[in-house]
Amino acid sequence: MIPLPTEAVRIGQCVSHHATRDPDREAAVHDTTRMRYGELDQAMTRWAKALLAAGVKHGDRVAMLTPPCTEWLTVMLAVTEIGAIWCGYHPRYKRPEFRHVTELAEPVVLIGFRHIHGRDYADDLIAMKSEVSSVQSLVLLDEPVDGGVPADAFLAAGDAVSDDELAAARGAVKIDDTAVLIFTSGTTGRPKAARVKHRALLIGGAVELEHWPMDRPRILHMMPVNHIAGVGMTGVFGLYAGGTLVFQDRFEAGDLLRLLEEETIDHLLGSPVQFHMMAHHPDLEARDLSNLKFLTWGGGPIAVPLVERLNTLPGELRTSFGMTELGLYVTFTEKDAPFDALSRTIGKPHAAFDIRVADAEGKVAGPGEQGEIQARGPWLLAGYFRNPEATAEAFTADGWFRTGDVVKVWNDGNLEIVGRTKEMFISGGFNIYPREVEMAIEEHPATGMVAVMGVPDEAFGEVGHAFVEPRPGTTLDAAELDAWCRERLANYKIPKTFEIRSELPRLPIGKIDKQTLKREFSERQPRES
């Protein structure tokens, strides 16, 4: 691999660097589209000029509705090349979610596909442009909608922008500028937007390559691109390494196995549920996966039997820990880690990062003790966009970022996640925030009180379970609530089960007693022998 220069400050320099030295090297693959580094560099440059022609300035936001694909990669890089901030919308969003994130980010340009996986987003795109005054341009990558501009016309307008104008915009970008907004959430249930820096994404690429050493790897990219794993841990990492990103725009285990074989994939990064589905697919044994060098997961624990099954495949098994606000992975399991460490831990903190495990008073935990993972350093998020209160709450008095994840320190330094200080749970690799789900259910006219929590699930790690108390004089059933949620939430946020109760337990101050509900649910579960 040809190393990046130490003076790199923009993630787009990963592309231009490799394009200069190896322009014919394959950079990205999606279906029948195959882009070389030279072609990707040219496309990134043309989109950057078009954005400048549209009036996009340093610090402006550009939003995009897209699955993982070459168009996503090109536009995301172009936006960040000129100092603007890219933010991604998940195709599973429903109308209220689109409105929330658009009002929060206030993008000046919205770029997207009208059709994704059989769903027509025309009304959603039109509504975002008409209802949020910041949106000046709506650019369509496939079929037109009212008020939208075809991508070809948008790009043509940028041809009048000079190379000097583009160079000036690039030169104004600093390594600690925000590159992307990644939407997360908090106890209020309303989305927050974490400001992830160029620095975090570039350092993340370097550290991943150190732990997963490969020469110009071929990486399967199947992660959503509104998620830090899709943007940074997979996307920027692949470009940093001078590798090839092979996109699967919608996860399906059989198609995944086909791509692993046909595209001679070196590195597969996914969630535990994705690995579970792959490992139990009937095509597994028939596929030639001999090129695999690393199988890496994050986003939750993985059972020992699954680790054992994955160990029969080519490639080293690794697990890591990162999160949106960190912008990168900060812990890694080591080469030849035992099965119990792969299953139960997130590895050890990387020496380059200032990481501690501490209690509420800031006392550092020793072997056998528990505490919260906390981090400090210039690569951390630049704060939550336009939310100083949430930013302040995220840090301790002495300046450490609080991840909310409680771990036990093993004698060998590995960290085992044992709980979360916040209620967020992870289902199939997706962060689920109960309050956001509760608010959607509470909008139902027959709903009184609602409590949502994560409960164990063999395939997904955790899934949502909703306790619902109907309003007096009304009735509810699970099917009705499920249908209600499907109109308002992405499907991965919808509780797997709904439990209707005439009355939910309350604390003295009138809030729902979630601890009692958790205990009651746990007591109903069959005991392990």
Image (cartoon, rainbow, N blue to C red):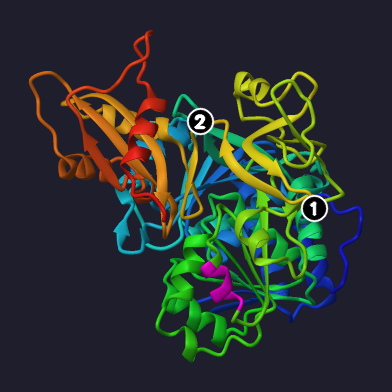
Secondary structure found at label 2: helix
Q: Which residue appears at 79% of the width and 46% of the height?
A: 199
Q: Position of residue 525 (x, y in %)?
A: 33, 46
Magenta region, residue range: 305-311
Marks 1/2: CA–CA distance: 43 Å
User: Which quadrant does the N terminus fall into?
Assistant: bottom right
Q: Inspect this view and state whether residue 33 appears.
A: yes
Q: Which residue appears at 44% of the width and 73% of the height?
A: 253
**Front residue of 178 and 341:** 341
Q: Position of residue 22 (x, y in %)?
A: 80, 78
Q: Position of residue 412 (x, y in %)?
A: 80, 52
Q: Amino acid at mark 1?
A: Asp
**Front residue of 469 and 340:** 340
Res 339 label: none
Residues marked 1 and 2 touching at CB (< 8 Å) = no
Secondary structure found at label 1: loop
Q: Amino acid at mark 2?
A: Leu
Q: Which residue appears at 46% of the width and 36% of the height?
A: 102
Q: Overall secondary structure of the magenta stretch?
A: helix
Q: Position of residue 170 (x, y in %)?
A: 78, 49
Q: Earlier in the sequence, mark 1 or mark 2?
A: 2
**On screen, 119 above or below 372?**
below
Res 104 label: 2
User: Which quadrant does the C terminus fall into?
Assistant: bottom left
